[in-house]
C-alpha cells in the first residue's frame, strides 16, 4: 500500500526530545522520548498512524461507516471516533464494561465526536463485532471493521513509516534501545519491519501491558503480523524472530489496573520533565524502563528512546487510582 494512500490525519513528524532531568534522577542511560502524544488528532496518540492507512483502505473500498472496539477508556477508540468525525463517517464503538455513572476521559471525547457506543460487558476486543456488522448491513450500510488497536498488516504500515521517520530525525546518533508499550501487536510489528528494512541493530524492547488469554502466545502473534506486514512491500525484508523482544515482567495486577509502579512512573515524568503519561499503557511501559535501569540492564553506556504512544486523556478517569503526592 503506497504512502500516497495514507490519509493526512495527524501532525507528523512528531518531535524527539531529551529527558535530561529524568536521566539524572535515575542515574542511568541518556534518555530521549518520541512524542506521539503530540500527533494532534483528538489530543494526540499513536493510533493516528494506523488509522491513516486503515481509513484510507475503508474509503477506497466504498465503506460508509466504521466499527471498532476497545476498553471503556480506549485511546484507539477515541482517535477512531475523531478521525471518523473529520471524514464524515458514522462511527460505532464496541466498548468493554457497562455504562458508567459519570462520563469522563476518553469516553467523554467519544461522545463529543458523535460516536455511537455499544456496551459489551466483559468483551472489549470486538468479540461481538459480527452481530453489529450484520445489523448495520441489514440497515443498508456497508461497515468497515477496524481491528482491535488498529493492528492488522495495513494498520502496522503506520509504524513502518514511523521507524523511517525516526531514522531521518536521529540519523546522526541512533538509540541503542527503543522502549514502548506493546499491547495489540501492530505498533511492535510495524517497528520490526521498519527496523529490518533499514538494517539497524538497535534493540526494540516491547513492554507487554496486557495479559493475553487464548491459544496463541502474544509474542507469536507479533511475529506473524510482522511477517504479514512485510509481504505488503514489493521487496520483502525478512524479520528475524531473534529480534523480537517482549517483556512480560510488568503486567502488574492486570490491564488497566494502576499500581505503585505506574503511579511512580507517571509522577516522575510529570515532575521532572512536565510530560504526562497515561495510566494504562505509557505509565506501565515507563515503569518497566525505570526498573530496567535500576536493575542495571540499561546503564550509562546506552542511549534509550522511550516511544510515548499517547493516552493522557485517560488520566482524568483514573484520578481515584492515581492519588499522586
Image: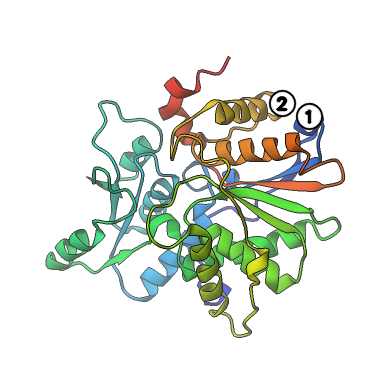
For the question of whether residue 66 can be seen, the reply is yes
Is residue 120 left or right of 276 when viewed as pictured? left
Q: Do the residues under discs 2 and 1 have CB atoms within 8 angstroms?
A: yes
Outermost front residue: 215
Is residue 75 left or right of 35 when viewed as pictured? left
Which residue is at a point 67% across and 64% down the rendered structure image?
243
- The image shows residue 107, relative to residue 58, as above or below, that is above
Is residue 64 left or right of 137 when viewed as pictured? right
User: In the picture, which quadrant includes the C terminus?
Assistant: top right
- The image shows residue 161, relative to residue 237, as above or below, that is above
Asked which secondary structure carries label 2, the reply is helix
Q: Which residue is mark 2?
A: 272
- The image shows residue 130, relative to residue 38, as above or below, that is below
Q: Which mark is residue 232?
A: none
Outermost top residue: 325
- The image shows residue 112, relative to residue 163, as above or below, that is above
Q: Earlier in the sequence, mark 2 or mark 1?
A: 1
Q: Which residue is mark 1?
A: 21
Tag count in the figure?
A: 2
Q: Which x, y percent locates residue 185?
A: 50, 59
For residue 65, which quarter of the picture? bottom left
Outermost left residue: 138
Query: Crowdedness of circle 1 by 10 Å Cα count: few (<14), some, many (20+)?
Result: some
Asked which secondary structure carries label 1, the reply is helix
Q: Which x, y percent locates residue 323?
A: 50, 18
Marks 2 and 1, how far apart at CA: 6 Å
Colour treatment of the image: rainbow
For the question of whether residue 4 can be seen, the reply is no
Q: Which x, y percent locates residue 110?
A: 34, 42
Q: Nearer the viewer, residue 150 or 188?
A: 188
Query: Crowdedness of circle 2 by 10 Å Cα count: few (<14), some, many (20+)?
Result: some
Amino acid at each position: 500500500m503506497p504512502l500516497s494512500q495514507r490519509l493526512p490525519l495527524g501532525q507528523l513528524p512528531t518531535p524527539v526530545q531529551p529527558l535530561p532531568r529524568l536521566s539524572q534522577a535515575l542515574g542511568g542511560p541518556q534518555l530521549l522520548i518520541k512524542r506521539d502524544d503530540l500527533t494532534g488528532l483528538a489530543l494526540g496518540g499513536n493510533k493516528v498512524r494506523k488509522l491513516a492507512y486503515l481509513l484510507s483502505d475503508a474509503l477506497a473500498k466504498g465503506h460508509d461507516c466504521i466499527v471498532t472496539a476497545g476498553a471503556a477508556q480506549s485511546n484507539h477508540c477515541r482517535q477512531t471516533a475523531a478521525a471518523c468525525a473529520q471524514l464524515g463517517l458514522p462511527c460505532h464503538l464496541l466498548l468493554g464494561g457497562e455504562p458508567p455513572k459519570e462520563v469522563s476521559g476518553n469516553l467523554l471525547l467519544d461522545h463529543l465526536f458523535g460516536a455511537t457506543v455499544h456496551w459489551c460487558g466483559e468483551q472489549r476486543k470486538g468479540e461481538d463485532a459480527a452481530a453489529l456488522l450484520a445489523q448495520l448491513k441489514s440497515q443498508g450500510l456497508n461497515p468497515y471493521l477496524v481491528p482491535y488497536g488498529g493492528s492488522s498488516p495495513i494498520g502496522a504500515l503506520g509504524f513502518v513509516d514511523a521507524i523511517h521517520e525516526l531514522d531521518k530525525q536521529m540519523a546522526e546518533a541512533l538509540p541503542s534501545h527503543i522502549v514502548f508499550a506493546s499491547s495489540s501487536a501492530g505498533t511492535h510489528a510495524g517497528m520490526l519491519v521498519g527496523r529490518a528494512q533499514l538494517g539497524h541493530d538497535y534493540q526494540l524492547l516491547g513492554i507487554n501491558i496486557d495479559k493475553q488469554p487464548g491459544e496463541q502466545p502474544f509474542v507469536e502473534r507479533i511475529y506473524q503480523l510482522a511477517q504479514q506486514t512485510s509481504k505488503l512491500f514489493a521487496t520483502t525484508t525478512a524479520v528475524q524472530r531473534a529480534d523480537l523482544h517482549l517483556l512480560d515482567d510488568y503486567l502488574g495486577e492486570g490491564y488497566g489496573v494502576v499500581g505503585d509502579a505506574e503511579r511512580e512512573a507517571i509522577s516522575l515524568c510529570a515532575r521532572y520533565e512536565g510530560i504526562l503519561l497515561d495510566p494504562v499503557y505509557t505509565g506501565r511501559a515507563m515503569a518497566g524502563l525505570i526498573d530496567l535501569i535500576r536493575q542495571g540492564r540499561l546503564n550509562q553506556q546506552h542511549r534509550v528512546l522511550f516511544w510515548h504512544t499517547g493516552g493522557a486523556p485517560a488520566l482524568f478517569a483514573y484520578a481515584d487510582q492515581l492519588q499522586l503526592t
